[in-house]
Image (cartoon, rainbow, N blue to C red):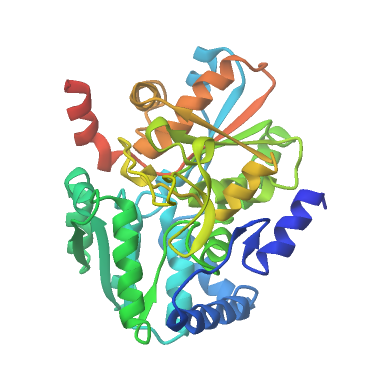
Amino acid sequence: MSKVETSRVENQEKGYFGDFGGSFVPPQLKSVLERLDEEFQKYKDDPAFNQEYLYYMKEYVGRENPLTYADRLTNKLGGAKIYLKREDLNHTGAHKINNVIGQILLAKKMGAHRVIAETGAGQHGVATATACAMLGMECIIYMGAEDTRRQELNVFRMELLGAKVIPVKKGQGRLKDAVDEALNDLVENYETTFYLLGSAVGPHPFPTMVHHFQSIISKESKRQILEKEGRLPNMVVACVGGGSNAIGAFSEYIPEQDVRLVGVEPEEAATLTQGTPGVIHGFKCLCLQDEEGNPLPTHSISAGLDYPGIGPEHSHLKVTDRAEYYTVSKQEVLDAFQELARTEGIIPALESAHAVAYALKAAKEMNSDDIIIVNISGRGDKDVNEVKRLLSE
């Protein structure tokens, strides 16, 4: 095991990834999070729990999903072979359901009946509402008011599934503000409520839990690429907002030093490329902040990447140079959204289009025997109206 991987595992057990992570929460939440960590550690390697989890992954979510060779796109670019990990084919349309099923089963083991969650693009909210409907739990979703406008279809889907969607008008009315309100709810109702956090952020043990359940992405893709090509990829590319799909896509490749791990951010929320160490939402990470340590306003055409912080493990991968992080422009994202649709017949989520945009540039600079895996974290049904509006402007 490499030094980077050893450090990651050792510090993960303490709630830290190098210098990042931790649990900066009010005293009344300390015991709640400690109990959550104890239950997670108890069940994550429990054969019966994992059998139930994998049952739902196969019979409900529809895994494993394909690793699709993008033949026409590869030939058009004339460079590296491009493979697409198809999280867009999951039930509810994104990677979020992988983590939601794991956490909802844990909530059931812990006797919870009321579940709260935050959402930006709406996919985590839809996945949470879906799982709560399946298990008959009360579901409350906090969503920034601006995001409820941009993702009106997902709001209706959540309500159709029986969830109560609470628009958050404070601040910018975006993902950060939804997380604020969800944490406030947890502080007030911690004795009866399970907070089903959707990204690889937050106080310990949330980043570790989300990594664990999302690692199914790279466990599959690693096995699939070895079956298809007989070797590992040269590069794995994923979009990064809070970091859940990316950490899942990277997980099994972190100890493979010859595999480049590339996270892609919007220029307007370039947390990893411009951020500095700070504390947000109960954990330490790289974040966009002013001189007083207050989070700076962010904006992205993709609601799911509109966050001023980043998961602590991504922060660690950045400062140790194990992963690379780049930004793409709004126009590059819109071009990639259309390119994948027209060339491969796959409409990606705007979040995923960030990863596609980088891959389009990178592939041209690589050899024809090189391999890129792009994580298509979600499908673009939720975004077509917004893209139509943006293109008309």
Residue shown at 54% from the left, 58% from the top:
284
Quick one: 390 or 49, which is closer to the camera? Answer: 390
Is residue 53 among what the camera can see? yes
Q: Horizontal placement of 274 versus 42: left or right?
A: left
Which quadrant would residue 159 be assigned to in this image?
bottom left
Q: Horizontal placement of 225 versus 94: left or right?
A: right
- How many numbered discs? 0
Residue 157 in the image: state x and y as whole percent: 21, 56
> Seen from this angle, which residue lies furthest front?
292
Q: Is residue 110 above or below residue 80?
A: below
Residue 152 in the image: state x and y as whole percent: 17, 48
Quick one: 187 or 372, which is closer to the camera? Answer: 187
Q: Is residue 301 above or below residue 207?
A: above
Residue shown at 24% from the left, 52% from the top:
171
Residue shown at 53% from the left, 44% from the top:
276
Residue shown at 61% from the left, 15% from the top:
365
Q: Is residue 129 above or below residue 251?
A: below
Residue 96 in the image: state x and y as whole percent: 42, 55
Is residue 130 among what the camera can see? no
User: From the image, which quarter does the C terminus lie in?
Assistant: top left
Residue 153 in the image: state x and y as whole percent: 19, 48
Q: Horizontal placement of 115 versus 222: left or right?
A: left
Q: Horizontal placement of 376 versus 17: left or right?
A: left
Which quadrant would residue 237 be assigned to in this image?
top right
